[in-house]
Amino acid sequence: VQLQASGGGLVQPGGSLRLSCAASGIIFNVYTMAWYRQAPGKQRELVATISTSGSTTYADSVKDRFTISRDNAKNTVYLQMNSLKPEDTADYYCNAVHRRYGSYWGQGTQVTVSS
């Protein structure tokens, strides 16, 4: 199983980034997908989830700024991040979870929001 995250980088406050996470080795469309983030010195926190049916949830801190989506044909989950703030700076991780098949993590992709 591999979850390959990409799309991180350095962006100015107010800017946008789009993260991608390509999955292999799992039946992607049966997994709930999620993005987490971990800032330096802080615990990992849940950012957004998308269910197999496309229902989404967001942390209050990113609501109305971030959008999670999935393309089952490409086995990929996305996180569109707009109006980025310095407090969004973190390593972002994708996660695939199924109540029977377990949970898998990708490697982090670093997002830095700074002028």
Image (spheres, rainbow, N blue to C red):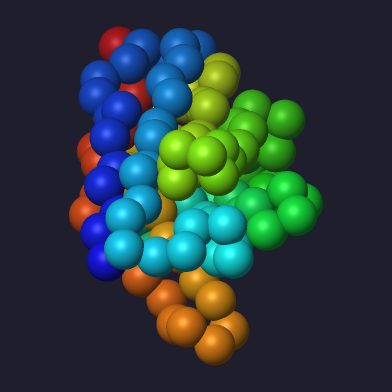
Image coordinates of residue 33 in percent, x first then y, are 54, 57
**In which quadrant is the N terminus drawn?**
bottom left
Name the residue: 53% across, 27% down: 80
- Horizontal and vertical percent for residue 71? 55, 38
Figure check: 5 above or below 13 = below
The answer to whether 8 appears left or right of 98 in the picture is left
Q: Residue at x 25, y 59 (%)?
A: 2
Name the residue: 29% across, 43% down. 5
At x 43%, y 25%, the residue is 18
**Residue 93 in the image: above or below residue 82:** below
Residue closest to the eye, 47 or 43: 47
Location of residue 113 with respect to 77 vertically, above or below = above
Q: Is residue 113 visible?
A: yes
Q: Is residue 53 toward the left or the right of residue 65 in the image?
A: right
Count of labels in the image: 0
Image quarter of residue 61:
top right
Left of 95 or right of it: where is 54?
Answer: right
Q: Nearer the viewer, residue 67 or 90?
A: 67
Residue that sits furthest to the bottom in the current view:
100
Instruction: Name the spot of residue 21 as percent of width and height, x first.
Output: 37, 43
Residue 90, quarter of picture:
top left
**Position in image of residue 19 (x %, y %):** 40, 32
The C terminus appears in which quarter of the rendering? Answer: top left
Q: In the rendered image of this protein, does residue 111 appear above or below residue 11?
A: below
Q: Is residue 40 visible?
A: no
